[in-house]
């Protein structure tokens, strides 16, 4: 068990340092602080509750599009002003629609950003301990995020903010999520775009 945890931690560290040319796009690592990327929405019928590693909690009011308790959820909100994603050149324009996808059995959440119906990017928030109930989606945020653009480029964000004392199980979850984002980005993008189109109000 100890060697497995050590190997997993090493894999996570290796992935964090990843800066390679990939067949589908360039992967780069940045440091980006979390901004308020969530704006207003027409309805607020479910709460997204994020618990940070330091124990602090942030809640967002969202419009529920799909809620399957114990399994998955899809929510929607709209950016109420221009917002820059620090550490990148990406700016979410006022009116950008965010469709958030959550699963109880995956080590990440995905936020699909759309401007006038066109994909701006996928923002993958690495997370664990996700629970989905009719009134709330809760998860523990693991700091590291991944930005996947339509061009295929991938930016790994915030890895410098990871505390050195992070638990091995969290490092393992981060490594697993990063591997998925890097090796299965096309599949994930196709899945999210399909699911978003299926649930967005016409």
Image (cartoon, rainbow, N blue to C red):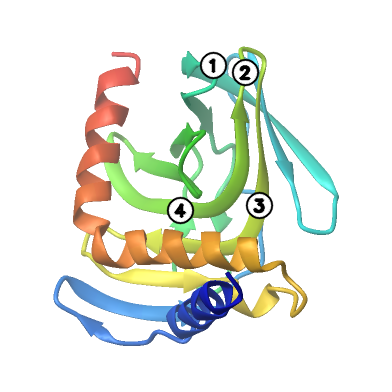
For label 3, the residue is: 141
Q: Are the residues tagged 2 and 1 within 8 Å (C-beta)?
A: yes
Disc assigned to residue 51? none
Question: Cβ–Cβ below 8 Å for labels 1 and 4?
Answer: no
Tag 2: Cα neighbours inside 10 Å, few (<14), some, or many (≥20)? some
Secondary structure state at the residue bearing disc 4: strand
Quarter of the image with the N terminus in it: bottom right
Front residue of 92 and 59: 59
Please tell me the numbered disc located at residue 133: 2
Name the residue that disc number 1 marks. Answer: 69
Tag 3, which secondary structure? Answer: strand
Label 3 to label 2, Cα distance in Å? 18 Å
Q: Quadrant of residue 41?
A: top right
Name the residue: 29% across, 45% down.
119
Disc 1 to disc 4, how far (Cα)? 21 Å
For marks 3 and 1, give the CA distance: 20 Å
Asked if one can make out residue 38 in the rendered structure from this viewpoint, the answer is: no
| Marks 4 and 3, the one that precedes in the sequence | 4
**Residue count near mark 1 (Cα–Cα under 10 Å), binned few <14, some 14–19, many ≥20:** some
Instruction: Tell me if label 4 and label 3 are in contact, CB under 8 Å.
Output: no
The x and y percentages for residue 79 are 55, 38
The residue wearing badge 4 is: 124
Depth order, front residue of 168/86 = 168
In the rendered structure, the answer to whether residue 194 lies left or right of residue 126 reads left
Give the percent coordinates (x, y) of residue 29: 46, 80
């Amino acid at each position: 068990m100890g060697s497995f945890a050590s190997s997993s931690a090493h894999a996570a560290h290796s992935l964090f340092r990843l800066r390679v040319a990939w067949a589908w796009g360039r992967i780069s690592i940045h440091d980006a602080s979390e901004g308020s990327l969530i704006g207003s929405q027409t309805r607020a019928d479910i709460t997204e509750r994020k618990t940070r590693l330091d124990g602090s909690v942030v809640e967002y009011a969202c419009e529920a599009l799909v809620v399957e308790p114990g399994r998955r959820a899809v929510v929607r909100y709209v950016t109420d002003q221009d917002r820059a994603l620090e550490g990148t050149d990406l700016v979410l324009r006022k009116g950008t629609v965010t469709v958030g996808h959550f699963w109880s059995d995956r080590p990440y959440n995905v936020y699909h950003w759309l401007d006038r119906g066109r994909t701006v990017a996928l923002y993958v928030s690495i997370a664990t301990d996700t629970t989905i109930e009719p009134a709330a989606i809760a998860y523990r945020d693991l700091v590291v995020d991944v930005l996947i653009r339509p061009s295929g480029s991938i930016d790994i964000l915030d890895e410098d903010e990871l505390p050195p004392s992070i638990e091995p199980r969290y490092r393992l979850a981060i490594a697993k999520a990063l591997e998925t984002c890097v090796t299965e980005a096309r599949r994930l993008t196709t899945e999210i775009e399909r699911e978003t189109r299926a649930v967005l109000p016409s």
